[in-house]
Image: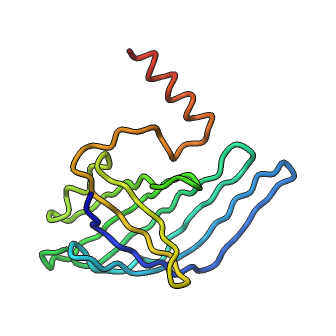
Amino acid sequence: MKEILTILIIIGQTFMVKNNNGQSINFINFSGNAESEYFTGNVMPGGVDTQKMNAEYSGLSARYVLKGKDKSGQDCSIFIENNGKFGAEYTRPVIVTDSKELDFLNDPTHLKGKLDFADGGLKIRIFYCDEPIVEEDTTAPADTDKKVKKDKKNKK
């Protein structure tokens, strides 16, 4: 497993909606920058992390675009959708990039993410795994996990 991207996040405005049934949604705008041997650039305006919480599920889904230069010095853009459950060790990022140098990131089956809180800030690290990741879905709500498992059994 090799770290490909490190994104330092700066939290912006936060909005919350909570109902009487214990469901809540946090909508967190953010900016930031990325530095690694593979890419250097900035989070474009509009980055948002949506956090959903209820009695059965608590998770996040962040979406943002990075603009900068890949390791060959070419201008490029990277879209990241990073999904995960609170308490899980890793998140599951999906990346779309126009960089030829970073084209390998367009295959999400090899990607893992990790959120780190350090020095009073948030750092997102994206890793590339040599082997495809085969594990239970750690990003879907609990009732969806059951449906996915059932669907997989029916396909056999």
Q: Residue at horizontal 45%, vertical 58%?
A: 82
Quadrant housing the N terminus: bottom left
Q: Is residue 110 left or right of residue 94?
A: left
Quadrant housing the C terminus: top left
Name the outermost residue toward the bottom. 119
Q: How many marks?
A: 0
Q: Residue at horizontal 46%, vertical 37%?
A: 136
Q: Residue at horizontal 32%, vertical 49%?
A: 108
As drawn, 40 above or below 56: below
Q: How far across and down, in percent of the image, does residue 30 sit?
A: 53, 76
Q: Residue at horizontal 47%, vertical 62%?
A: 63
* Residue 71 vs residue 137, the one in the foreground: 137
As drawn, 104 above or below 109: below
Q: Is residue 50 left or right of residue 16?
A: left
Q: How far across and down, in percent of the image, does residue 90 sit?
A: 45, 55
Which of the 4 quarters of the picture holds residue 76?
A: bottom left
Q: How far across and down, in percent of the image, does residue 37 sit?
A: 21, 76
Which of the 4 quarters of the picture holds residue 96?
A: bottom left
Name the outermost residue toward the right. 20
Q: Is residue 69 left or right of residue 18?
A: left
As drawn, 18 above or below 66: above
Coloring scheme of the render? Answer: rainbow
* Residue 64 vs residue 153, the one in the foreground: 153
